[in-house]
Amino acid sequence: MARLKDKYLALKAELQSELEIKNSNQTPKLEKVIISVGTGFAMKDNKLIKNIEDTITTIAGQKATTVIAKKSVAGFKVREGMPVGIRVTLRGENMYNFFDRLVSIALPRVKDFRGVARNGFDGRGNYNFGLDEQLIFPEVTYDSIMQIHGMNIAVVTSADSDKAGFALLEKMGMPFSKGSN
């Protein structure tokens, strides 16, 4: 079992009492983590798209998929069928392993890191934040990438409020910033 899942099971009772939840099945938990990269800068370069897909696959430990445009949008110079993004959805063991590596290894490697913003919650306990580069993950070698790109990470929880989602992620080790940004 993943190290972070053991940690969650150990702190579940503490989280339940802190949030004053009567039924232990209503205690918030991680449901999925979605990693996505918009590839607007690389739409016409298939080698770069493949490189980004390989990088995200390496980071996630699971095969990433290419998102294809369903409609043409002239203002963005997008045609139907063009690749517009890369994404991967992690659940179960892969999710816990990735989240553990994210909070314990990758985020502390961010230059001038003072914690992730507290204002990334969506009102339903889910948290979104972006990273500027993929090189903070130790799995990625500098020589294997063609272009530095960022990514969006969405952490979906079963919490019904931002307060419960924040409490869960804080107990799971998410390094939130000290200020109220």
Image (cartoon, helix red, strand yellow):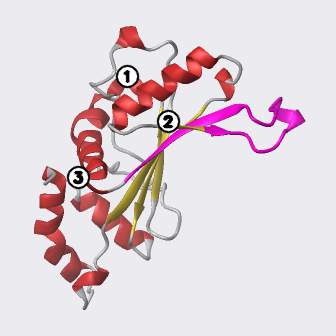
> In the picture shown, does residue 7 fall above or below 94?
below
Asked if the residues shown at circle 2 and circle 3 are in contact, with their CB atoms under 8 angstroms apart, the answer is no
Q: Residue at x 13, y 59 (%)?
A: 7
Q: Position of residue 1 (x, y in %)?
A: 13, 54
Judge by depth and name the residue closer to the eye, 43 or 80.
80
* SS for callout 2: strand
Image point (27%, 59%), residue name? 170
Amino acid type indicated by mark 1 = Leu
Residue type beneath disc 2: Met
**Which stretch appears magenta?**
67-90
In this view, the residue farthest toward the top is: 143
The label on residue 173 is 3
Residue 126 is one of the magenta-drawn residues: no
- Find residue 65 and report its horizontal and vertical position in percent: 52, 38
Q: Residues within 10 Å of mark 1 (few under 14, many from 20)?
A: many
Asked if the stretch drawn in magenta spans residue 84, the answer is yes
Residue 77: give x, y in percent of width and height.
83, 29
- Marks 1 and 2 sit apart, C-alpha to C-alpha, by 11 Å
Badge number at residue 135: 1
Q: Quadrant of residue 29?
A: bottom left
